Amino acid sequence: MDAAADGRYAKARRVLRQFYRWYATALIAVGFFLSYVDRMALSLLVEDIKADLDITDFQFSLLQGLAFSLFYAVMGIPLGKLADSANRKKLLAACISLWSLFTAGCGMAQSFIWMFLCRIGVGVGEAGLTPAAYSVASDMFPKRQLGRATSIFTFGAYVGGGGGLIAVGLALAFFENGGASGLPWIGDWAPWRLTLIALGLPGVVLSLLILLTFREPLRGAMAEGEAVVERVSFRDTLGFLRQEWRVFLPLMLGTSLCAFVTYGSAAWAPAFFMRTFGWDPQTVAANYGTLNLAAAAIGPFVGGYLLDRASKGTDVARALSVLVIIVIVASCLAIAPLMESPAFALAFITVGIFAKTAYGTLLPALTQLMVPTSMRGQIVAIYVFASNIVGSLFGPAAIAAVTDFGFEDPNRLGLSMAIVAGSALPFAIGMFLLARQGARRAKR
């Protein structure tokens, strides 16, 4: 009788433990969702912000790229190291509350410099999320489930890109229709300002929820036979990357080139539909945002499934083969801006977003498979640094530079997007092929 009761008790504990794992994963996924909403909100508010602050396309690209991405990338290194040694629950809560408050601060900006400084704050806050989140995941899930677990994180992020546009569009419409007219002090503020302030509030609530309900996992709990080292220097991590450079160098370069295309496309796609087809922000949110959401809802799970099925937890070369195919599909991002019909443009860009979200799941999960437990936070931070320095720092700026200084015509934005994407993606595919070759050589 006692043995049967003990068995039921043990089973109940296993069920509760598994439930908690997925609950904690869902909390972090919400964090990724909010990070992408706050990160991409400016893209839908571009015309209102430009008119109110009297700035050019290139200056606006600096708000999306330089102000956010440089500090997001640079601060990812020390925060990644912190994720390998400090309490990750407190780190997650602090970072989420920081970027949320600065997002609200963007809504109060009275000048380009003010907005620039607030975007720096958003970048610093979001820099700690990715290394802490993937470090936590590797300690909560065995390797055979890691692809599915991380796909939930990227699901939250990419749904934030599409669903966030819908949320921003709804909030903007609400405030444009006088939804805050009865509030003291801020009732007569511009709708785009009230929208950004409203977007900052949910992150503060989420950070409190993490502090109250999240439990810090034991480091190395899922390290299958690895000798767990609590602290590893950054020099040791760089030494490991140098040793395996045939895989990691082309992987990082290919990742950076893909980010160069995808960040640029995401930053300017709403403005492309507004300028080329005369859509207003609400129409962009309803059409582009909805299809973006649908593609983002499927892509991460497809990427996680393909990773688990192709690699069986160990075969990096086979997983990289899947990655090459997915990036080829992502080339639709170069075709979409050339379409003269909004329906065809939406169709091609939706396929590109689907591929982008699928490989966005593969890349960080691959990193977790290839590196020791004690280096995962730092190496994810290096991956984030590389992709953001080349990607979100230069991607939006490159498109704006071609538009402002090349064509000198804001209505040629679509052609600028096609030129940038079509130039970078073939090189990205070549880099991933080299990484696959390096992985096969290492396996032999």
Image (cartoon, grey):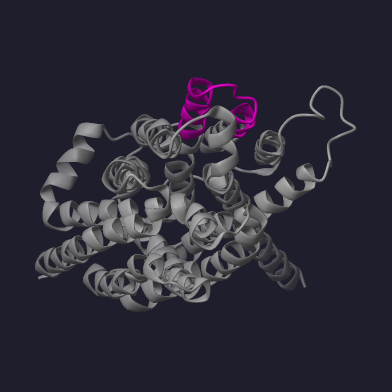
| Quarter that holds the C terminus | bottom left
Seen in the image, is 289 located left or right of residue 408?
A: right
Residue extent of the magenta highlight: 100-124
For the residue pair 352 and 210, the one nearer the viewer reads as 352
What's the residue at 33%, 77% (across, down)? 310
Locate residue 396, reporting x and y percent. Answer: 37, 45
The quarter of the displayed image where residue 192 is located: top right
* Magenta stretch holds residue 420: no
**302 in relation to 67, above or below:** below
The quarter of the displayed image where residue 381 is located: top left
| Quarter that holds the N terminus | bottom right
Q: Magenta region, mostly helix, strand or loop?
A: helix
Can residue 143 be seen here?
A: no
Residue lying furthest right: 182
Seen in the image, is 315 located left or right of residue 105?
A: left
What's the residue at 46%, 28% (across, down)? 120
Locate residue 84, reporting x and y percent. Answer: 39, 37
**180 in relation to 331, above or below:** above
Locate residue 261, reporting x and y percent. Answer: 33, 56
